[in-house]
Amino acid sequence: MKEQILSQMTTECPWRDTLYWYDTIDSTNTQAKKLAKEGAPAGTVLIAGNQTGGRGRMGRSFSSPEGMGVYLSAILRPGCKAEELMHLTCAAAVAACKAVENVCGIFPGIKWINDLVCGKEKLGGILTEMSVNADGFVDWAVVGIGINCCQRKADFPKELQNMATSLLLQTNKIYPPDLLAAQLTEALFEINNILFQKQQIMDIYRQHCITLGQNILVVRGEESAYGTALDLDEDGGLLVRFADGTEKVVSSGEVSIRGMYGYV
Ligand code: BTN
């Protein structure tokens, strides 16, 4: 499978030399973190046929059945302070959307901060993790991306069936995961080359962010508050006007949009 992925990439992309394929793995992010700690170079890419313990944000699991999706993690070493890398999930989302567009012509919507969506359903997600040293510098970052390619509704776990989608369900065509994996590796390489052109990245993200203008529920720990999503800053923070009239930038936690993923 590795050869199949490489044959669909340009020979110019240097990340092809540090690409690893796993038939099955618990989580490409977990393995990427292990390799990063052992000193694996920037541009190391891990791709799996299936994950037995695929992980999402907020401790959730990510359904990763054999041969049905792309499960990919890349190691980055951006050489900057953590506070300069707050937009990394947004940058990865832009790269993932570009890869999907290259493969099937659809540029997905982005539900802040890390979900790729088509209509009201989730097509994929991003999980970024990083290690920061005592001086605040990022030692390594791992960008994990999962995208549903070939699932029919019955292939998703019951509880996800009314909120998940795939490229097959969107287009009625089979797009093999290896084709998308090749495009995704190249798109991540390209976004990594312009990682600090934040405005350029966030302009694209903003254009496709379906959260903007919506009535939302912001949940942080035990607290939750209603508001309206107004804008994004260049670090990917979400500017929210809360029901009491105050405006604040939200940079973590969970945002629900009315009518999506079971929030009514
Ligand atoms: C989310 O939906 O909250 C994020 C999902 C991220 C899934 C990808 S699949 C490849 C990588 N390995 C993981 O365990 N998670 C990410």
Image (tube, rainbow, N blue to C red):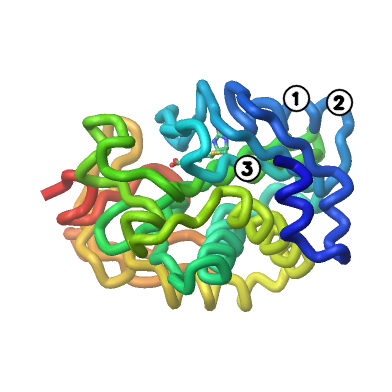
- Residue 252 position, x and y percent, is 45, 46
Q: Are marks 2 and 1 in contact (CB under 8 Å)?
A: yes
Q: State whether residue 143 appears in this view.
A: yes
Q: Quadrant of residue 245?
A: bottom left
- CA gap, disc 3 and disc 2: 19 Å
Q: Amino acid at mark 2?
A: Glu
Q: Amino acid at mark 1?
A: Lys
Q: Is mark 3 within 8 Å of ligand 1?
A: yes
Q: Which residue is mark 1?
A: 34
Q: Residues within 10 Å of mark 1 (few under 14, many from 20)?
A: few
Q: Residue at x 51, y 22 (%)?
A: 53
- Residue 67 position, x and y percent, is 52, 38
Q: Residue at x 34, y 61 (%)?
A: 172
- Residue 54 position, x and y percent, is 51, 29
Q: State whether residue 86 appears in this view.
A: no
Nearer mark to the viewer, of 3 and 2: 3
The mark found on residue 38 in the picture is 2
Q: Quadrant of residue 36?
A: top right
